Amino acid sequence: MKEYDTVIGLEIHVQLKTESKMFCSTSANYFGEKPNSHVCPTCLGLPGALPVTNKKAMENAVKVGLALNCRINNFNRFDRKSYFYPDLPKGFQISQFDLPVAQEGFVLVGDKKIRINRAHQEEDTGKLIHQTVSGEKVSLIDFNRCGVPLIEIVTEPDISSAEEAKNYAKKIHQLMRYIGVADVDMEKAGMRFDANVSLKPKGAKELGTKVEIKNINSFGFLEKAINFEVERQTKALESGEKIIQETRGWVEGKSETVSQRTKETSPDYRYFPDPDLPPLNFADEVLKTIAESLPELPDAKTERFEKEYKLSNYEAKLLVEDKDVADWFEEALRVYLKVGESEDETNKARKVANWVQGEVLRTVNDTGMSIKELKAEPASLVELLIMIDKNRVSHQAAKQVFAE
Ligand code: ADP
Ligand code: MG
């Protein structure tokens, strides 16, 4: 059997958090609402209705670009991507083509640099619901999601395994939460993956024909779908078959990918600048203000926690994983340094880190609450730590008190 290299490029769609939709003033808060209750002439694509760009969505898009170390295109614009789909009433999606908001960045996954080709802003489609009504199989359309702001983040084909793809996806998820532009709620399809997968003879320069697996909605399925596809393509190549460029879907019930259509290529979409929308031109000062509003990002925070608090890389990563946990840790430490016995900062940091990694995160996991929802505040933990320091309570008893 020949050996193959796996080559993967990911396209990730993230719904951006905004009050209103991408090109109209209809509320974007549609989840769980009555079907077709969040619609207007613009997002329904009725003749004569005109789109207006959502400023907040574009600010969020810039933040995404900056968090991905991209170059921001001051001048960018929207294009029409023509295709027919029942839940896309205009017959085209407003997207960005040759002048996207952000280009040429990278994300670190462990030590590996995954290059970002582009991040472009677009609008989401509606939703088809396939049901049986009065014994008849029907497809219903809910347009509530139609026109909700969506950013698409496209990598170069730099990913070389299913596991790496999953870790990259998790990193994007983390970054989106850090910069606060998206809920990235997997249950609400706030983040979806398309995985492009190909094989090539080990060490070969030229890339093989890729297959795109569309619309994967969980990290676990992403890994499974890619692994399945790698195996399927390996078998096909081994038996002398040619891989055809196509779009496949992951069917969880069957644990396999199935062919959906042979893929359109870019010319089929007939991209052209949307004549209803003026191009955007960000002033440098605006970009600067947005850049300054970004919080410290996970990689930088991890490095700082290692240096400043003498934590191991493993511990630092654990605390930094969720920004709220990192903030909780630092707030507790800040209070502890101020009011506790004078003691070496490193010592105190270690104690707080141990408690946060241990009892605090355990309580968070056990209760299913977020750290922000915990009744115990950072200052309450510090009170306990001081009691332990003064030998008023044992460590064991303190754990019980914390749980209470
Ligand atoms: P398309 O025009 O079909 O959308 P693109 O060249 O824009 O293709 O690439 C889409 C995604 O597929 C990108 O993430 C890219 O990195 C990835 N990709 C491109 N070629 C390959 C390949 N041979 N194998 C795996 N992924 C690929
Ligand atoms: Mg797209």
Image (cartoon, rainbow, N blue to C red):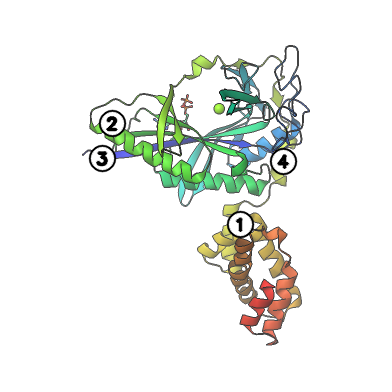
- Which residue is under mark 1? 301
User: Does residue 366 lie above or below 114 as drawn?
Assistant: below
Instruction: Using a 10 Å C-alpha cutoff, classify the residue at mark 2 as few (fewer than 14 neighbours), some (14 to 19) or many (20 or more).
Output: few
Assess whether mark 2 and mark 1 are in contact (beta carbons under 8 angstroms). Answer: no
Q: Quadrant of the C terminus?
A: bottom right
Rounded to the nearest angstrom, the CA distance separating label 2 from label 4 is 49 Å
Check disc 3 and report the residue beneath it. 3
Q: Earlier in the sequence, mark 1 or mark 2?
A: 2
Question: How far is the residue under mark 3 from the one under mark 2?
Answer: 13 Å
Q: In the image, which disc is placed on residue 290?
A: 4
Q: CA distance from mark 1 to mark 4?
A: 19 Å
- Give the mark nearest the N terminus, 1 or 4: 4
Crowding around mark 4 (Cα neighbors within 10 Å: few <14, some 14 to 19, many 20+) is some
- Asked whether mark 2 and ligand 1 are closer than 8 Å, the reply comes as no
**Viewer-nearest of labels 3 and 2?**
2
Give the structural element (helix, strand or loop) at label 2. Answer: helix
The verdict on label 4 being within 8 Å of ligand 2 is no
The answer to the question of whether label 1 and label 4 lie on touching residues, with beta carbons closer than 8 A, is no
Question: Within 10 Å of the Cα at label 1, are there few (<14), some (14-19), or many (20+) other Cα atoms?
Answer: some
Please name the residue that numbered disc 2 is placed on. 236
- Tag 4 secondary structure: helix
Callout 4–callout 3 Cβ contact below 8 Å: no
For the point 69% across and 63% down, which residue is it?
328
Measured in 3D between alpha carbons, the distance from the residue under mark 1 to the one under mark 2, in whole angstroms, is 45 Å
32 and 378: which one is in front?
Answer: 32
In this view, the mark in front (4 or 3): 3
Q: CA distance from mark 3 to mark 1?
A: 40 Å
Q: Residue at x 70, y 77 (%)?
A: 384
Where does residue 96 sit, x and y in percent of width and height? 61, 24
